Every structure is written in C-alpha cells, then in structure tokens.
Image: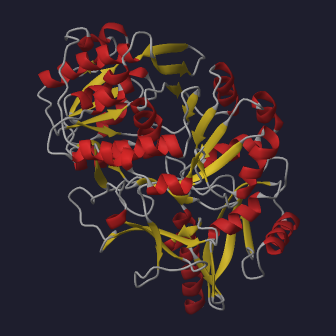
Amino acid sequence: MRDYLTATNDFDYQRTVAGALTGHLSALNACVECCDRHALPGRIALFWEGRDASSATYTFTDLQDKAARFANFLRAQGVKQGDKVAGLLPRNVELLIAVLATWRIGAIYQPLFTAFGPKAIEHRLNSSGAVIVLTDALNRPKLNEVNDCPAIVTVAAAKGQGLVRGDYSFWAELDNYSAVCEPVLLNGDDPFLMMFTSGTTGPAKPLLVPLKAMVAFQSYTRDAVDLRPEDSFWNLADPGWAYGIYYGITGPLSMGHPITLYDGSFTVESTCRIIKKYGITNLTGSPTAYRLLIAAGEAFSSKIKGQLRAVSSAGEPLNPEVIRWFAEELNVTIHDHYGQTEVGMVLCNHHGLEHPVHMGAAGFASPGHRIVVLDDNHQELAVGQPGILAVDRSQSPMCWFAGYQGLPTKAFVGNYYLSGDTVEWNPDGSISFVGRSDDVITTSGYRVGPFDVESALIEHPSVVEAAVVGKPCPERTELVKAFVVLNPQFLGDAQLAETLRLHVRQRLAAHAYPREIEFVSELPKTPSGKLQRFILRNQEIAKAEQAQNAKATA
C-alpha cells in the first residue's frame, strides 16, 4: 500500500499524463483511452445482468466494433466535434456503445437519468443544445412532451419494430455502417462530457468536463477505490449521474478493467445475486443503498459475508453506524468519499493509501488537491473551526472545473473553489463533514450539524433513515427537528420519540438533540438519492409563518 504523504507529494506520473493531455499537440481521444487501447483478443470490458437474471459478456473488441459503426452513423447525421449527444438510456450495452461512439468523433456525451420526467429532460436538452438524443422504448414516451426535442434514436425491437415514426433504429442503423472510424484526436482542455448539477437548491446547471479530468478519475479509482487487476468491480451508481459516469465507466475502463452493469431496480435480492454470481470483491455505491442493505440484516449479510474486499461510499456522508455494521457483520472496511459533480472526488478515506482513518470523517485530500476550510471572509481556518470546504486551485493540479456553461458563478473567490459545504479540520489532518451551509442549524447560539444528529439517530435499531433540520423558534432561533423513517418492526409513538431524544442527547450534547421528532414513511431525495433537507426545512418555515399569521389575525 502506498503512503498517503508520498502519494500527495509525488506527481511525476500525474504530471507526465497531464502534460500530454494539456500539450499543444492533439493526441487524446476518450474512446481510445477507454476502449481501443485495451482491445486485445478476448479481453472483457462489460459484464451485463438483466432484471430477469439474463446476462451477457462483451469484450473491448466488441465495443470497439460497435462504437465505430455508431460513430459513423452519427457523422452521417452531421454530428461533429463539440456537438452534444444525449443519452436517456438504462444500464445496457447500448449506453456504452453510444458513449464511446460520441467520444470517438470528438463529440460530447450528455447523460440523462432515466427517472427524469419530461420537464427535467427538456431543461437539460434545451440548455445543452443536444443535436441527437438516444433512448429506449420504455423512456421514449417522455420525449413526446419535450419542446424542441432533437432527432431521436430509439433502442427498440429487432429490425426497428415498435419504433415511433421518424425515429432512427439503433440496431438497424448499426448494421448500415462500417466498423472503421478514425478517432478524432483532441487536447486535454477539450470537453468530452456535459454534466448537470443535481439541482438540490435550484435549477440544474450545466458544466463541461475536459479530457484532462480523466487523469483525476483514474487516480481516484486507483488510490481511493483501490481497484486492482484481480478485483471484480461493481459501481451501483447510475451512469446518468456524475459518480456513475466518472467512476463506474470512465475510471475503470480507462484502466482496462471490466465493469458490471445491472439493468434493474435496486433490491437486496438482486444485490446479493450479482455479488455472488460475478464474485464482486470491490463495491462502490451510496449511503442510501447501504442503509437499505443494513435494514435487511442477516438476509443480506449471511449471503455475501467474506465476499467483499473493499467497499466505498459517495453521494452523502457515511454514518459511523454503517461503518461499524460492515466491519462487524461482513468483516469488510467501508470508506467514505466526498466529491461534487464540479470537481470529482476530492476528499477521501483512501483504500489504496496508508493514512489514519477518523471514524465518521470524510477523509483526506485526494492526491493532486489542496483542500482548505475558509471562514466567511475567505480566510483559512485551523483545527476545530467550522467553515466552508474549498479547493485551492492554485495548488491543485488535478482540479479541472472552470465554471458553468453560459452561466455566471459565485463558486470562485480568488484561487478558491467554494463547495458550499460546511466542514472542519480534525487534529489528525482529516476533515469532517458538518452539512450543507444552508443546512447548519443555529439553536440557542450553538451551531449544530445535521449529519451528527442523523448519525446518532441511525445508531438506534429502530431507525432506518433520518433527516434533521432547523425549525423556526422565537426563543432559540431554531430548534432541532428530526424526520425519522422507522424499521417496520417498530411503532412510531410518543414513547419511542422520547427514547430517541434521550438516545441522541446522551451521545451528543444537551443543545444538539432533536426536541421534535416526526415519523414519516419516506424522506425527500433527488433522483440520485441525495437527501433534500431544504424541502423539509421550507415546510417548517411555512408552518411557522402560517401559525404567526393566524395568531396575528386572531
């Protein structure tokens, strides 16, 4: 295992690659990096599993052939370097072919999550100016409600049966074109992905990801995920989101490592089946998925114990209880990783690097990044002082984000990129997540991070999930309120609410426990599974205003 300090200070290999990416010579193509370079006879690129337990295996040579054919189709439709090609596709081989074909001709791939409704799709397609959108028969009806929808390619039945009039048939068109297509060579500043932020606090904003970001994607896959040649790897994230396309496809494929795609709903049964069937040893996913697996208890753990070597978590902070459960029940280490669509994964407990692991902390700066904590005046803070997590771009050669496409941004102050998340340094040099800046609660003069309270609640066996917000309070400014999803074996009554309040108070502090607890069946989340505390907070603000108005008119 490499030493963390050595990895963060030694960038010879990264400078070499980054120099090639950003040099004046056009010498890079994402399809070549993620496919052609690894297209040796029989070398596997994809293990695919269907929801009905059907399966298929594809080699890099298979993908190279089909990507070249579809690239020639795109060219025949007038798609050129820099154009956007959108994919509203499930986790099937067609998605991979579309991505690689788009990259092959120097175009920009724009992922669309299949759970999006027509308006979310319309916003992204219109904002990007995509010239073609690919979809399947299940998602095709959504495009009927999209204004100014571009040309449509549909993955449908054999020979295009069931196609909407005017659509291109993916597989029928593939057979009409040559498997010879010279890749367009670009430089590191040229974009190859167009992403949209998750839109948790406003409309989703577009940003272009340059080819040089592939160095950071591969570095994370190697250092944080610790993906080894002997591993069988599965990233649970959907490629419609940053974590899925960055680290479920681009990172591992650029290393010549096969990936696993499952075209089906997330369930405990399907997760166990795929882990066993494909011998998964290295797993990445979200805390939401892991909490659902934990809720299944022995029904999950008994089937896969001893199977996994390394587990990684991203998307939301990882609660300490999840870490303990994986260690005790599965005998495997699960590490928390922090990142954003804009900058990738910049703060991690690295599986592949030797450094201390602080229980519940987001971790240490990823190699090639200098992470700082800033106060409201953008001055760097020391240990134990909550502030905004920022990336010092002047000393972060792996930071590639340059702003939103066509939109002003307040995310940059001098050399700093401001994440909008509140964190604090720990004495061992790691950083702990406190919450989104808007989520931090001020109660009786104290600042309370919702993550700490949520983690304490989840430690109780009755709690599956929790969200904590500040409720307006004239005496305390805000009081801490928790929304709790219970294990079905528990009854949400006043007695349990009091038990949970005392449970948190004993673990945190007298000012930090939830004075109000509301039991709910589910929590509001983005389509990618991120908790939307602001919806709950806004509900409480609205209730407080209604009560105030009613009192004023009484």
Horizontal relation, residue 99 to residue 423: left or right? left
Q: How is the image coloured?
A: secondary structure
In this rendering, the answer to whether 18 lies above or below 485 is: above
Residue 226 placement, left or right of 419: right
Residue 274 in the image: state x and y as whole percent.
63, 24
Q: What percent of the width, then of the height, locates residue 329?
A: 81, 41
- Image quarter of the N terminus: top right
In the depicted view, which residue is nearer to us: 14 or 382? 14
- Is residue 468 shown to the viewer in this render? no
Q: Is residue 43 left or right of residue 170?
A: right
Query: Eyeballing the image, is 243 above or below 441?
Result: above
Q: Residue at x 36, y 64 (%)?
A: 395
Q: Is residue 105 above or below residue 467?
A: above
Q: Quadrant of residue 331?
A: top right
Which quarter of the image is occupied by the C terminus? bottom right
Q: Position of residue 5 (x, y in %)?
A: 53, 57
Residue at the image position 79 percent from the left and 58 percent from the top? 459
